[in-house]
Amino acid sequence: MQKKRKWLWRTLFWALAIGWVAVLFFFSGQTGAESGELSRRFTAFVQRMFPFLPLARDALERLLRKLAHFSIFAVEGFLLCLAMMESSRDKGAGALLSGILCTAVAAANELHQSFIEGRSCEGGDVLIDSAGALLGIAVAALAYFLCRRRRRDRR
């Protein structure tokens, strides 16, 4: 029963991590016009919800775009780290490898954007993506070890 449960968790984490990469590439596959329209609508929504924000529309839109990069990759780092740790004997190596893979996905994602009309490849975005992934990895590793410790203490 224990092996079956472990296999189910591992499969779930990998499916979520791979599915999230598909979401990343979906958004990076939008044309510049489509991406810009989505950003403008979201910025307008944020301005309606938080009218007290002291940022001009353009500055807020840029900030939100960078936060989207960071957040999307934080989720990817979290999911991939759980998948790697669940699949590895050496949990630390699994976490480290997930960081390397997330950075590779960030670079591939930016490169992919360079082939899309109205989009560009920006090295700064790879750094922002990698920083987000690092946060997700740290949270996942902490949660993983706390859950394992709690499970061990119950026994």
Image (cartoon, rainbow, N blue to C red):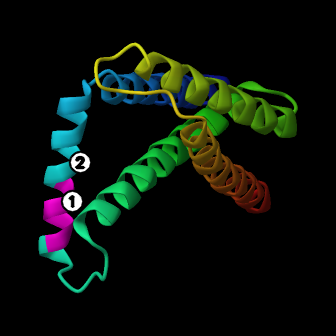
In the image, farthest residue toward the top? 115
Can residue 45 be found in the magenta stretch?
A: yes
- Please tell me which residue is depicted at 46% across the width and 45% down the height of the picture: 69
Position of 102 relative to 15 (above/below): below
Residue 64, x across and y down, in percent: 35, 57
Could you say which quadrant of the image residue 91 lies in? top right
Q: Which residue does the numbered mark 1 point to in the structure image?
A: 43
Of the pair 154 and 63, the residue shown nearer to us: 63
Would you say the residues marked 1 and 2 are in contact, meaning their CB atoms lie under 8 Å apart?
A: yes
Q: Residue at x 32, y 23 (%)?
A: 26
Q: Amino acid at mark 2?
A: Ser
Q: Is residue 108 left or right of residue 103?
A: left
Task: Please tell me whether mark 1 sits on a helix, a strand or a loop.
Answer: helix
Q: Is residue 155 above or below residue 87?
A: below
Could you tell me how far apart the alpha carbons at marks 1 and 2 are, in whole angstroms?
6 Å
Q: Amino acid at mark 1?
A: Thr
Q: Is residue 94 left or right of residue 75?
A: right
In terms of secondary structure, where does tag 2 sit? helix
Secondary structure mostly seen in the magenta stretch? helix
Front in this rendered view, residue 8 or 112: 112
Q: From the image, which quarter does the C terminus lie in?
A: bottom right
- How many numbered discs? 2
Q: Where does the image place residue 44, in percent across and percent down from the top left?
A: 14, 62
The residue segment tinted magenta is 42-47
Residue identifier under label 2:
39
Seen at 72% across and 36% down, the residue is 99
Residue 54 placement: quadrant: bottom left
Quadrant location, the N terminus? top right
Query: Badge 2 local density, few (<14 within 10 Å), some, or many (20+)?
Result: some
Q: Position of 83 compared to 152: left or right? A: left
Q: Quadrant of residue 104?
A: top right
What is the x, y in percent for residue 10?
A: 59, 27
